[in-house]
Image (cartoon, rainbow, N blue to C red):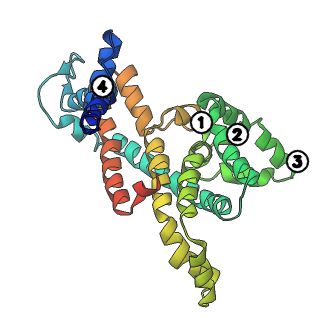
Amino acid sequence: MTAIALTKPADLRETSILPGRGGFFGQLSDAFWRHPKLLLLLMLTPPLLWLGIIYIGSLIALLLQSFFSIDDFSGLVNYEFTLATYAQLLSPTNFDIIVRTIIMAALVTLTSAVIAFPIAYYAARYAQGKWKALFYLGVMLPLWSSYLVKIYAWKLILAKEGILTWIFAKLHLSWLLDGILNLPIIGGNSLSVSYLGTFLVFVYVWLPYMILPTQAALERVPGNLIEASSDLGATPGQTFRNVLFPLALPGIVAGSIFSFSLTLGDYIIPQIIGSSRLFIGQAVYAQQGTAGNVPLAAAFSVVPIVIMAVYLWLAKKQGAFDAL
């Protein structure tokens, strides 16, 4: 009995360790099991190479071009370090493009936040079951259709002979539409060739990116805080200012990252719907392609990068990344 008891643990140790699997794939599987970090390294290498070489590498190569200049006589790139290209951004024409784009991005972001908040609040506080599923379907459905199809559809809606003009005419409000189109700066021959039309399409396209983070932030607001605020005698306005809005602010800032940055870099919407005045995205496209001034196009592309770097730093301080 003693001999059996002494030999039994040894037998168990021998049988508890499975023999290695044969073949190349079996040995490879055993190696991954023994060295899990090796498997992690192999899985991360392709995306890191893509991000580091293809994306970041090409971006750095483009940004380096901004420190070169164009020879006025030959039109060729002069590969000597200079800040003259950045000085061109301060010219009245180019600086006007930068200011115009920033103002448009800020207005689109602010309007999207105002529209998104009540929608997100209803979904977070009252929508349950199939109604919440319907909410997500309604918000996400526009994102499933083609980007260009949506823009050209809005081109038809906002055109002088479009459905919006027809609705104003049927309601005997053509005078109101004409008055809006006659406004300086934002007006035009029709909404489809005005800043107001560009603004409306920007808000429509980027609104889902504002609704979802805001709704996610409002979901985390405990309902008993709102009830406690009411029990302590706060008015609905005071509850909103002192309780609801501060807690929802990270989600709003997170949504603004999308709407603001996407508006800064977009060139298709202003190209199809809007006036002939350029935005940053159009300027980069024009200088890169038509004009062949790659250094100036690279300098223009630095502007939204710098703006978004500062904006992301401020957003991080507001805890916006916690709501993503």
**Residue identifier under label 4:** 32
Disc 1 secondary structure class: loop
User: Can you give x and y, in whole percent of width and height, for residue 203 in the image?
Assistant: 59, 48
Per the model, the C-alpha gap separating discs 3 and 1 is 24 Å
The quarter holding residue 13 reads top left
In contact (CB < 8 Å): disc 4 and disc 3: no
Amino acid type at image mark 2: Leu
Q: Residue at x 49, y 69 (%)?
A: 247
Per the model, the C-alpha gap separating discs 4 and 3 is 71 Å
- The extreme left residue here reads 80
User: Can you give x and y, in whole percent of width and height, for residue 141 in the image?
Assistant: 67, 39
Disc 3 secondary structure class: helix
User: Can you give x and y, in whole percent of width and height, for residue 127 in the image?
Assistant: 71, 59
Comes first in the chain, label 3 or label 1: 3
**Residue identifier under label 3:** 170
Q: Residues within 10 Å of mark 2 (few under 14, many from 20)?
A: many
Amino acid type at image mark 4: Phe
Position of 187 relative to 62 (above/below): below
Amino acid type at image mark 1: Ile
| 268, 140: nearer the viewer | 140
| 51, 109: nearer the viewer | 51
- The extreme bottom residue here reads 233
**Residue identifier under label 2:** 158
**Residue identifier under label 1:** 273
Q: Residue at x 35, y 48 (%)?
A: 308
Which numbered disc covers residue 243? none
Q: Nearer the viewer, mark 4 or mark 3?
A: 4
Disc 2 secondary structure class: helix
Amino acid type at image mark 3: Lys
Comes first in the chain, label 4 or label 3: 4
